[in-house]
Amino acid sequence: MNFRSLTLAALILAGGVVSSAQAQLRIVTYNTGTGQSSGTQTARSGMDIVLQAIGAEVIGGIAKPIDVLLLQEQYSTAVSTQSFVDVLNGIYGAGTYARSTLNALTSSPDGEAGGPALVYNTQTVDLIGEQRSGTVNGSAQARSTMRYQLRPVGYDAAADFYVYNDHYKSDTGSANSARRLIEATNIRNNSDALGEGTHAIYVGDYNIQTSSEDMYQHLLSAGAGQAFDPLNSPGSWNNNSSFRGLFTQSPATTSQYSGQTLGGLDDRFDFQLVTGELLDDEGLAYIPGSYHPFGNNGSVSCCNSPITSGNGASPTVLNALMTVSDHLPVVADYQLPAKMDVALGALPSMISVGAPVALDVFVQNIANVVAANGADELDYTLSVAGDLSGGLSSTAFALGGANAHQVFLDTSTSGLKSGVITVSSSSQGAAGALWTLPVSWNVGGGGAVVFKTIASDDFDAPLNRLSFSQTPLANSGTYNESTEGFGVYQVGVSGAIPSNLRDDSNNGSPTDSIGIVDTATKTDAWFGATNLANTNNATGEASATWEFDIAGASALQVSIDMAAMGDFEAGGGIPDFFNWTYQIDGGGEQPLFTSSVDEAGSATYTLADGGLRSVADPLSMTPAGGTTVELSNVFQTLTAFLTGVGDVLTLHLMASNDGPEAYAFDNILVEGLVSLGVAGDFDGDLDVDAADLAMWQTSFGLNDGGDANDDGVTDGADFLIWQRNYTGASAAASQAAVPEPTGAILVLLGATTCLLCGRRRWR
């Protein structure tokens, strides 16, 4: 659980600090043949080529260094396994990789063939525990089963998984088959004891030729630790061309080193099986399509041919595979659980009574992956308590950036307010799955922050509009303005207004069947769009962009009066849409108003003369942070809530249309919270002094002049704010004693108190 106490005057950026190492998991099992007491006990020359190539291989959009390397035939962890650590650290940097320390037991007195071991990437995986199990002797297991408990870095125990690493008894015959079954039985007893819900991977050199082998069937038998083949490829694999893309032994036909098993590729000896928990696409899970013998893409000649007969890797890599081992590595990628980060936007510490104030809540899936499919989706619920309202459920995807939501503050009365925002995730094994964020704010306590108009464009007298542009340009000859158009229009001013935008039914044209602007009553300017596609504009697309000065404002919202009428189309060669987006200081583009078409519905429109028109496929608009509204030919005010603060707000309209459908809008209004100065500084000279007291006295009982807390009246509460913030006429004077109220002021305060008491009695 994460607790954060927030000072809302400071902006908390969305997104957490994460490690530089991308961390969906690439897991590899590899029998390296380095366990002979009389032979090579360390990584052979060329192993760096193989291991680096595994990390560089792109599978399903993912390429990354090995995270977990399960090795077989390790003479000892200190000698053999450490040599692979050294190779990997030579590629990726000192300290990147580490190894297990526990040695497996072997049935050979001098450790012939060696045991299983582990190498892991310390930047992406933590080794929580290691265990060896099984009876090891000449009639039971040939080597210990090694079990490793691992945890992705940055996650808790809910994301733990287990890897069982085994090298089963080799050779055919009933006695060897029986010894393999003993080992499989030990493994299942161990994994079943972990219970349902355990994520386990069973890797190693199985030394079997068919899926009917008793040990294999036992691994696949029912129970808590039931194993599954991610490829679901049962059969008789040996020398069977149908399975040549699964063969792992042997990549060579001519000897490359002493003791190497030859014969070419003809067997599926090496495996990664998994429990069902890794196949549900939830939390930690196998990524379909990623399992494969490295270097073997099924193009090898069958059977008994060297790996160089195929094209599963570069010639350099294929040659290295022949020289470093008599097995091929088996590679599979696994998605990580989601990882949740939550941050809050900025709010002023002082808020006026009744101001509509929203608090931005940013939720992000920060699982640190190379590709989005490298992590589970983040399913979460946002809820609130206390003096807050709002709540929702949503989903965030890795690499998808932060989802921006809003909760709303109670500003109905003055005083200190507080609430708790809770964001919880139900995603399996998610890190940071519960966030509890207490927040507090003061309403009407300072009077210095008000909700007001920041900027606007009513197409008559814009406020704080920095720029405006449109494409196609106005009056460029692109459109026949009598029936087509995109731009600003005004009755009596524009040379022509497209007929589908005009409602002339009450202005000399009673047969008018489509139109928005009542030309008999609306004489100010507005913006309209209709019939956008013609020979001059074959795409049917048009756009307009506004820039507004919003410096010093927060808790922004945009309202626009919109109307639409016509038979709109969602698809086709040129679909109908009118989508608004916004940016702050050139940042990421966010949806503002998004249009949609109800192609199964119809709408009835009322023209200016009262006549009714029924038209199919109406247009609707969804504001950011709001609910979908069906537009009509009567202007409706739609409001969208913005996230973020900055200096310049850019609004962008992207329109597409190829018919007589009409869309119009007016009165773009940007509102937000702004600071007006020091509370009690009624004359605006940045000092709270005697001059301000004089203004308070003059304004007492009125609605302006001395209203420090912006509650609509100048009263005793405003005097107390003036007294608390008194600075005097200069910095030196700020050290002087704060004046006590005079007799006249005390009378006014007393009268205020009586009035307040009287009001309370009448509640």
Image (spheres, rainbow, N blue to C red):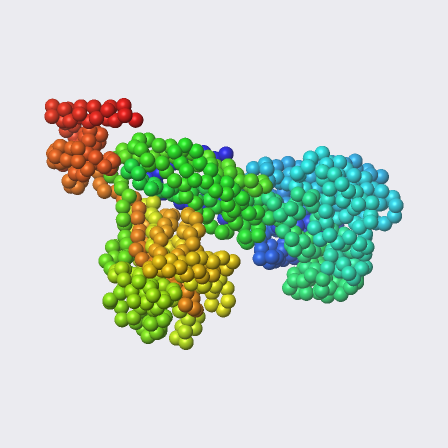
Residue at 28 percent across and 54 percent down: it is 456
User: Looking at this view, is 205 or 31 the one in front?
Assistant: 205
Q: Residue at x 43, y 40 (%)?
A: 390
Horizontal arrangement in the rendering, residue 153 relative to residue 577 (left or right): right
Residue 693 visible to an observer of this rendering: no
Closest to the observer: 107 or 458?
458
Q: Nearer the viewer, residue 627 or 54?
A: 627
What is the x, y in percent for residue 169?
80, 45
* Count of picture labels: 0
> In front: 590, or 3?
590
Q: Residue furthest bottom?
A: 535
How far across and how far down the image is residue 524, in percent? 25, 60
From this viewpoint, is residue 205 visible? yes
271 over 756 or under it: above or below: below
The outermost residue toward the right is 174
Task: Locate the C terminus by quadrant.
Answer: top left
Q: Please tell me whether residue 702 is drawn above or below residue 539 in the rendered image.
A: above
Classify residue 653 by image quadrant. Answer: bottom left
Residue at x 71% of width, y 44% of height = 202
Q: Which percent across, then down, holds residue 399?
A: 50, 51
Q: Residue 730: x percent and y percent?
A: 14, 36
Residue at left offset 77%, top offset 61%: 242
